[in-house]
Amino acid sequence: MGEPVATRELEKLDVFRDLSATGRNMLECGMQLHHFDELKTIINKGNSVSGAYVVVRGRLRVYSISPSGNEATLYFLNPGDICILALNCIFNNMDYPAWVQSEPDTSVGVIPSLTYRTLFQTEPSIQNLTVHALSVLVFRLMEELEEIHALNLNARLAKFILMRSEGGKELRMTQSELASHLGSTREVVAKLLRRMVADKVIRTLRGVIVVEHPEALAKQAMPQ
Amino acid sequence: MGEPVATRELEKLDVFRDLSATGRNMLECGMQLHHFDELKTIINKGNSVSGAYVVVRGRLRVYSISPSGNEATLYFLNPGDICILALNCIFNNMDYPAWVQSEPDTSVGVIPSLTYRTLFQTEPSIQNLTVHALSVLVFRLMEELEEIHALNLNARLAKFILMRSEGGKELRMTQSELASHLGSTREVVAKLLRRMVADKVIRTLRGVIVVEHPEALAKQAMPQ
DNA sequence: TTTCGTGTGTAGCTTTTGCTACAGAGGGGC
DNA sequence: GCCCCTCTGTAGCAAAAGCTACACACGAAA
């Protein structure tokens, strides 16, 4: 169980620095803080969106579920990140199009829809924040779409390991989590990893992938 | 060869109505008009973006090219549409990440980057236009990503035919164009179409697909 | 009419990916 | 130690999709 969120913790985040630069205190503006002690599904697909979500502490996982029941992680939200899907919903009066799960000890700030839209009309910092967040997502999504067409699963896996391994050394993630990120299945991921291990490109441990030969991995991340 | 663009033509578009509601005339603001008589590649991947592009007449096709040389159409821009990729580039100082081709007799208005950014800071109509265009794209992209994971090619093809056939009757598009939209190849598309023809769901003519049985097609567009 | 380019029909093979099924390995709690 | 749960290793088959290769059809231009 984590300690309650301190104002100090809020002020560390760029988002809130931007917001407070407008001379407003978010809590006074009506922002609510929610805390989740444990892993819990906090939004289901089709839920209505009450406001703009900003992660203050911990992590949120946004994912979709295919009809066959497979989960595919869309992205994570770390402290300071805004949920852009929720922003979209606010500006288009739509229901939330995915699922969201909180990790243990996660705090989320919620700025009510109306408040956010009002702030957007008057505050340049909120305008820029919004547009920037949206653009970044658009690019990420287009890149991913292009990748799916251009790269086979092995290349996408190689690329994923490269990008997410801290300092290009190792990646702490189970094989099913990997599969979920790539929209594939564990067995297939295991098969591909096996080949990489045979090629001495990586080593696998329980819940960890150790990158042995980053250059070779980068080569596998290339088309073909 | 088309006639030059008339002011009347500009005023018909929602975008410009929004803009002129701000009491500004876009041409006076520095918008330039470009006309293309024939099919021509007007932007290459990596080109710098000079401003916000608005289609006034005709159509632009935005596409990516995979390393193997296959084109995959990302989307079309019809009169009144803004190129959101270009918007993104403007707000993030990036180079254009795809290719753009003009159809014959196409006119495009270009609002210089700086002008657009200035307008964005002051004009609510431009703010809303921008955010709305971005959100819509984000949703479209996420939907497509989810579809690729959840649906097989046959279902995606069925859905595509349904969505794009005018009034659910027929779709004027060659099989290679279809393949390009789905990021697949002509032969595979032909194979799937063949099966649909055998099932009496569609009829195929040269450059045309006639929808015979929309309900059956909708059924094929479902997962599995 | 002939020719040529583009669009379509089709076959067969290969590769990739998914699915089922099971065995073993490691680690935490009892 | 023992149990149980999760994570991993592996095999084998099935389905999906891509690639190669060719034949034919249609229509426009010469």
Image: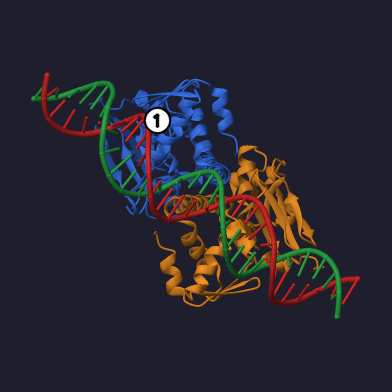
Chain colours: A blue, B orange, C green, D red
**Residue A100 in the figure: left or right of residue B16:** left
Given the image, what chain letter belongs to the residue carrying mark 1? A
Whole-percent x and y of residue B8? 72, 69
| Residue A29 seen in this snapshot | no
**Residue B121 in the figure: left or right of residue A167:** right
| Residue A217 seen in this snapshot | yes
Closer to us: D29 or A43 = D29
- Kind of residue at badge 1: Pro
Q: Quadrant of residue A2?
A: top left
Closer to us: A110 or B23 = A110
Q: Which residue is mark 1?
A: A79
Q: Residue at x 70, y 47 (%)?
A: B51
Q: Residue at x 62, y 72 (%)?
A: B208
Image quarter hosting the N terminus of chain A: top left
Q: Residue at x 59, y 52 (%)?
A: B126
Image quarter hosting the C terminus of chain A: top right
Closer to us: A94 or A210 = A210
